[in-house]
Amino acid sequence: MTKDAARLVLVVEDDLSVRRPLEKFLEMHGFSVLTAETADEGVYELRKHRVVAAVVDLRLKLGSGRDVVASAPADVPVIIFSGVPSESAELERLRPRTRLIEKPYSLVMLVEALESMLADVKST
């Protein structure tokens, strides 16, 4: 299946029970979705594809989502979802276009934040 590059989002989450509903919800809202379970897979997908945004869990079983966030191009909005807000504070401060959404999270709120961040990119 070809991915629509205009709305291609990378989701990095190792928990299938979180990743799958998020992927389906994003697709219902017009996004094409790439998924990765590990930090290495996430970094690989960022190098291989031009995504418009990334949604990254910081605590992965294999590696740290921080590596994915740091590898994302500066113009790509990144939503970090984490149950520990202090983990993302430094990344939000250092990297432009980065926002935290705390777990447990609302899928609606996540998509609204993503749409808002993408609109901000288009207006700059």
Image: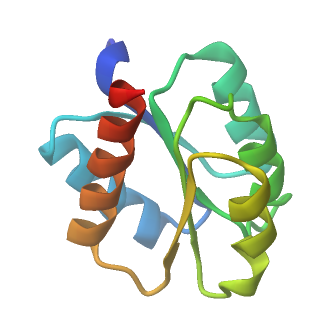
Residue 76 or residue 5, whichever sits in front: 76
Examine the rendered structure and indicate whether residue 93 appears above or below residue 2: below
Residue 100 or residue 33, whichever sits in front: 100
| Image quarter hosting the N terminus | top left
Q: 77 left or right of 61?
A: left
Examine the rendered structure and indicate whether residue 85 appears above or below residue 92: below
In the image, what residue occupies the spot 66% across and 27% down? 46
**In which quarter of the view is residue 86 placed?**
bottom right
Q: How many marks?
A: 0
Examine the rendered structure and indicate whether residue 82 appears above or below residue 62: below
- Asked whether residue 4 appears in the rendered view, the answer is no
In the image, what residue occupies the spot 80% across and 44% down? 70
Q: Position of residue 29 (x, y in %)?
A: 15, 45
Q: Position of residue 58 (x, y in %)?
A: 71, 66
In this picture the colour scheme is rainbow
Q: Residue most toward the front?
A: 124
| Image quarter hosting the C terminus | top left
Q: Position of residue 33 (x, y in %)?
A: 38, 36
Residue 62 or residue 98, whichever sits in front: 98
Q: Position of residue 96 (x, y in %)?
A: 65, 46
- Asked whether residue 25 appears in the rendered view, the answer is yes
Q: 56 left or right of 94?
A: left
Q: 91 left or right of 105?
A: right
In the image, what residue occupies the spot 74% across and 62% down? 93
